[in-house]
Image (spheres, rainbow, N blue to C red):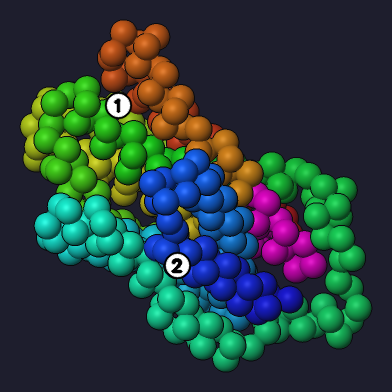
Amino acid sequence: GRRPTLILSVVLIGTATALIGVLPDFYAIGIAAPIMLVLLRLLQGVAVGGEWSGAMTLAVEHAPPSHRNRLAALVQLSSPVATLLSSGAFTLVLLLPPESFDAWGWRLPFLAALPLLGVAVFLRIGIEESPEFQRLVDSGKRARVPVVQLFRRAPGRLTIAILVSLLGVGGFYFMTTFLVNFGANERGIDRQIMVNATLVAAVVQAGVTLLSGRLAERFGPGRVTAWGGLATALVAFPVFWLVDSGSPAAAIGAVSLGLAAVILAYGVAGPTLTLLFPAELRYSGVSLGYNLAAVVGGFLPLAAQASLGWSGGGSWGPAALFGAFGLATALGGVLATRVITRG
């Protein structure tokens, strides 16, 4: 069911995050400290894989069809809100004296996961199972091994789901990690300015997320996904030209512009993916499509860094990669529209 999986995923995330906050350091337990940190991060990642998919599936299946896209966009608001909260938390603890931050201050944001976990579990216990899943249970049509059935019955739809998700995952990390480092390390812009640019972009991201949901209600989520992919391809080079200028204001505008294009597609990824799959394969289809895209898209910042070598340090290499990811998601949006329309 959707509800039990959501409860399990948030418990795993909250527990792993809090354990990072009490993890002994290298001086206490040696090499075991970084190994345990990596294992806890992997546990977070596994849990997040079911968290986003479950939250989106449950939201879409509970929503009336006329408001499905705007309510799904609200789930996507978790990304900019989380960026603001996490960055804000570390901004506060960085006010501590450096020796206090290094000794114990950095642990506080992680330990804050415990009270948040209590709130999350309390809210989710009260959630009702989705009507569509309940109908599957009543009719006895549940897939016994959904992942196997997914590869047998819907490999094409899974491929489309990966294309739809590619930009949202890879493009987001590209803008918030690679571009920040590129501006600071390669173009000499103050790193704090580049980090602050992501906070400004998070506010822009929230507005574009809501806009994408409203556009999807009028034109369909697949079309809006395609528009976001095309917009990303169009702004890929201008984003880097702005950063190349070395101007702090231009750099902030570049991060906001690039992220806005990415989020136009990502904001409606949820309804696009959920509508691609029949109810008995939906959770597995959404989860696998999104997370396989994350595996591929997660390498985009690394590939972009490598591209600086064969582009002689020029920004056209990473810009071309960014644009290519946009075109791939645009193709996914076009194909998804056809599949969803056909039913």
Q: Is residue 175 left or right of residue 29?
A: left
Q: Is residue 55 left or right of residue 316?
A: right
Number of labelled discs?
2
Q: Which residue is mark 1?
A: 237
Question: Which residues fall within the magenta stretch?
Answer: 273-290
Taking depth in this image into account, of 177 and 37 the one nearest to the observer is: 37
Taking depth in this image into account, of 337 and 273 the one nearest to the observer is: 273
Q: Which residue is mark 2?
A: 18
Q: Position of residue 49 (x, y in %)?
A: 60, 57
Which image quarter: residue 57? bottom right
Q: Position of residue 76 (x, y in %)?
A: 44, 63
Q: Is residue 194 left or right of residue 3?
A: left
Kindly identify the amino acid type of the residue bearing the numbered disc 2. Answer: Ala
- Going 40% across and 25% down the picture, which residue do you hit? 304
Kindly identify the amino acid type of the residue bearing the numbered disc 1. Answer: Phe
Whether residue 287 appears in this view of the structure is yes
User: Where does the C terminus fall, quadrant-wise?
Assistant: bottom right
Which image quarter: residue 252? top left
Residue furthest to the front: 28
